[in-house]
Image: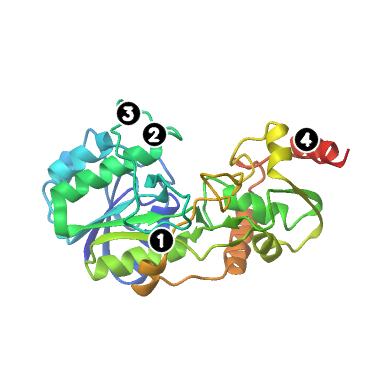
Amino acid sequence: MKVLIIGGTSFVGRHIVEKLLEKGHEVVLFNRGKSNPSVFPELKRILGDRRKDAAKLANEKWEAVIDTSTYTPADLEPILENILTDHYTFISTISVYTDFKQGPVKENASVFEKKVQGDKVTGETYGPFKVMCERLIEERLGDRALIIRPGIVVGPADPTDRFTYWTIKLNGKGPVLIPGSKKSKVQWIDARDLAEFTVSQMEKKATGIFNVAADSISMEEFVSSLAAGELETTWADDSDLLDKGVQTFELPFWIPISTDFPEGFILVNNEKAKSTGLTLRSLEQSAKDTLEWSKTEGVTQLKAGLDEEKERDLLKSLKK
């Protein structure tokens, strides 16, 4: 198939392109050429800003489009005005859901309805903006639209370092601060499993909405699956961390248990995707590959997690 990728050189998009090439598709990239411009030198590129240069896409018919980099309606409108395609896949997020009180949510659960003014993406506007984008795609493309809602994406080339933080910390030495209850749940999706599912559904021209996430496990299982170093782990209660001023997600994968988040995390039901072909590699494999990637890339300054000094101070204060 002749496939246009909007984005395609950073993390999720990059893994999707690799999977498309592995399966023999003809791939064209449309992006600004700023993120990892040296990857995929063999591929045709249409260089441009999606808000200003989407008219460059109007001259061709695409068998499929995969949009990996839309965050706001202002990003999307120019694309939809100029694109001609048989099938459009949009990478959205589970952050569109509004209510996690009743456990893992299904695809038909409530989402944000309020329209956001302006164009600034923040923690508060990210989910609502994605809902607005989903609605635009459904209105314009109808039965040609596939919407993928991934959980926290992990794996090699992750620019957020959320999962990388734990693979490095739990394969090192010395004391490590572990947040929250051992029974709290966590969930993720390996970028390569997300890519495999996205491409397979595109090939089938599947439509509708899919939550794409691994099976949830306890934080205790998560830690034991990743730990391989000479570790001394110290578990800190939600209340202790909050009292010390630690913010939600300041420690990756940590949300304090509350009425809104009774499992201690944002969890989705993945049965629909699994019944349609989603396969999941082991957490241990994701961690091993991520750790190897981080060593190869020389990752030392992590964008996520506590710095060593703050972690030491917290550990000392918790032992008093």
The alpha-carbon separation of the residues under discs 4 and 2 comes to 32 Å
The residue beneath circle 4 is 309
Looking at the picture, which amino acid does disc 1 mark? Answer: Val
Provide the secondary structure element on which disc 4 rests. Answer: helix
Provide the secondary structure element on which disc 2 rests. Answer: loop
Q: Where, by quadrant of the figure, is residue 55 drawn? A: top left
Farthest residue toward the right? Answer: 320
Provide the secondary structure element on which disc 3 rests. Answer: loop
The residue beneath circle 3 is 119
Provide the secondary structure element on which disc 1 rests. Answer: strand
Q: Along the polypeptide, which appears first: circle 4 or circle 1?
A: 1
- Quick one: 240 or 11, which is closer to the camera? 240
Pinpoint residue 147: horizontal percent, then vertical percent.
29, 55
Pinpoint residue 164: horizontal percent, then vertical percent.
61, 52
The residue beneath circle 2 is 125
The residue beneath circle 1 is 212
